[in-house]
Amino acid sequence: MKYFAYPALFYKDENLIRVIFPDLNISTQGDSVTEAFLFAKDLLRQYFCYALKYDLDYSLPSKVEDIIPKCKKDEIAMLVDAIVDTKKL
């Protein structure tokens, strides 16, 4: 098993909550903050399943403290984590 934790930016866009992982250049969205957070966790897990399976390079996570000052007024930075079962790859 491998554990990954990356900062994500959450912001409201019309009726959706959008989520961006700046270090990985991937994004998702949900109808609520809870749904967006769960989708973000799943996206992160899928991203790393693929990266590990195909031995791809990926960026190391920034510190949340470094991301917060870059947030726009309507954005919230949160740490999102995922666990990848490497035995199933």
Image: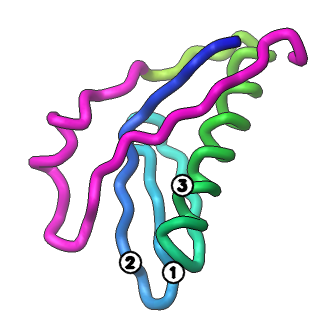
Q: Which residues are magenta?
A: 60-89
Q: How is the image coloured?
A: rainbow
- Image coordinates for residue 64, horizontal then vertical, percent: 25, 36
Q: Earlier in the sequence, mark 1 or mark 3?
A: 1
Per the rendering, the mark at residue 12 is 2
Q: In the rendered structure, does residue 61 fall within the stretch colored magenta? A: yes
Dividing the picture into quarters, in which one does residue 2 lie? top right
Does 27 sit above or below residue 16? Answer: above
Local crowd at mark 2 within 10 Å, few (<14), some, or many (≥20)? some
Looking at this view, name the residue that lies furthest to the left.
Answer: 69
Does 14 sit above or below residue 8? Answer: below
> Label 3 belongs to which residue?
27
Amino acid on which disc 1 is placed = Leu
Amino acid on which disc 3 is placed = Ser
Contact (Cβ within 8 Å) of mark 1 with mark 2: yes
> Label 1 belongs to which residue?
16
Q: In the rendered structure, does residue 35 fall within the stretch colored magenta? A: no
